[in-house]
Image (tube, rainbow, N blue to C red):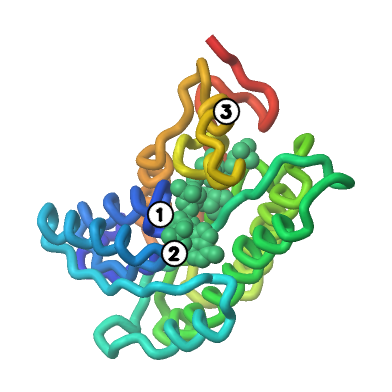
Amino acid sequence: MISLKDKIALVTGASSGIGAATARAFAANGAKLILTARRQERLQQLAAELQEQFHTETLLLTFDVRARESVISELSNLPLAWQAVDILVNNAGLSRGLSKLHEGSIDDWEEMIDANVKGLLYVTRTIVPGMVARGQGHVVNIGSIAGRAAYPGGNVYCASKAAVRAISEGLKQDLLGTPVRVTDIQPGLVETEFSIVRFHGDEQRAGKVYENLTPLTAADVADVVLFVVTRPPHVNISELLLVPTDQATATLVHRH
Ligand code: NDP
Ligand code: 8X3
């Protein structure tokens, strides 16, 4: 098992949900953390919590993953002590809307594609060369059950997560012969701010997604992320689907 003690982990989308939970799990295991998101105050609160609980060293970076120039300039100019990133968790992402494709919002589509696909690519392109040069690294992409099969109204979100799956597979192939590992984690229903964002702030509609079933928590997903990054160096968990017991497929759920 690999120890995270003093390893440097970069988690995008650390201001909420799965990213924040992953930061907590890594901090509890001794990692140093580069935490990124747009909401700086949230990152500051999390960093203070981790400092108090685990004496975690953090570097906070505030940028939009869709802003290519910002991503590249922030991540290419890390302070010297933070440059040797051991683990990258590409988690920042979102869904917008659940409309039929022929009735959908093009703005929503662009936001999803720009964050979930292009943002992930910008971060990966900037960080992975250092991993290859140092001969050490692990890229964990947060995909989704939505990337395995489309569901009604999921169209472009599903496509963006299918792209994450293909990019993960392609990256793994391109890194063959290096020790750098690549994992695509594919959660089903996780109760975070995800559905509130999907429905543009409609909390009532968001709440209905998880009504009368027991969804995964962000901490459940973080446990799995922690598990994959702490496997021995010769073990690469390429992809991992995790769903609540109350969920069989993206659309088949059991409500009590
Ligand atoms: P949350 O909405 O709770 O968290 C999303 C995170 O992504 C926030 O920290 C947000 O930070 C960040 N983010 C979103 N857009 C951008 C952007 N343009 N630039 C920078 N950061 C951004 O949702 P989750 O924790 O659930 O989502 C995390 C990941 O997990 C996403 O990729 C999502 O697709 C995936 N996922 C979620 C599932 C679920 O059911 N919840 C299931 C499967 C996968 P900020 O707004 O501060 O920038
Ligand atoms: C999030 C899971 O099923 O709401 O990726 O699309 S789902």
Residues under numbered marks 1 and 2 in contact, where contact means CB atoms less than 8 Å apart:
yes
* Residue 209, label in figure: 3
Residue type highlighted by circle 2: Thr
Kind of residue indicated by mark 1: Gly
In the image shown, does 23 or 37 lie closer to the viewer? Answer: 37
Q: What element carries label 2?
A: strand
Name the foreground residue: 231 vs 226: 226
Q: In which quarter of the image is residue 61?
A: bottom left
Residue drawn at 43 percent across, 82 percent down = 75
Residue indicated by mark 2: 12
Q: Residue farthest to the right? A: 102
Residue 248: image x %, image y %? Answer: 63, 24
Going by the picture, which residue comes out furthest to the top? 256
In front: label 3 or label 2: 3
Residue to which mark 1 is pinned: 19
Q: Do the residues labelled 1 and 3 touch (CB within 8 Å)?
A: no
Instruction: Give the CA separation, mark 1 to mark 3.
Output: 21 Å
Can residue 196 be seen in the rendering of this structure? yes
Along the line of sight, the residue nearer the viewer: 144 or 213: 213
Q: Of helix, strand and loop, which one carries label 1?
A: helix
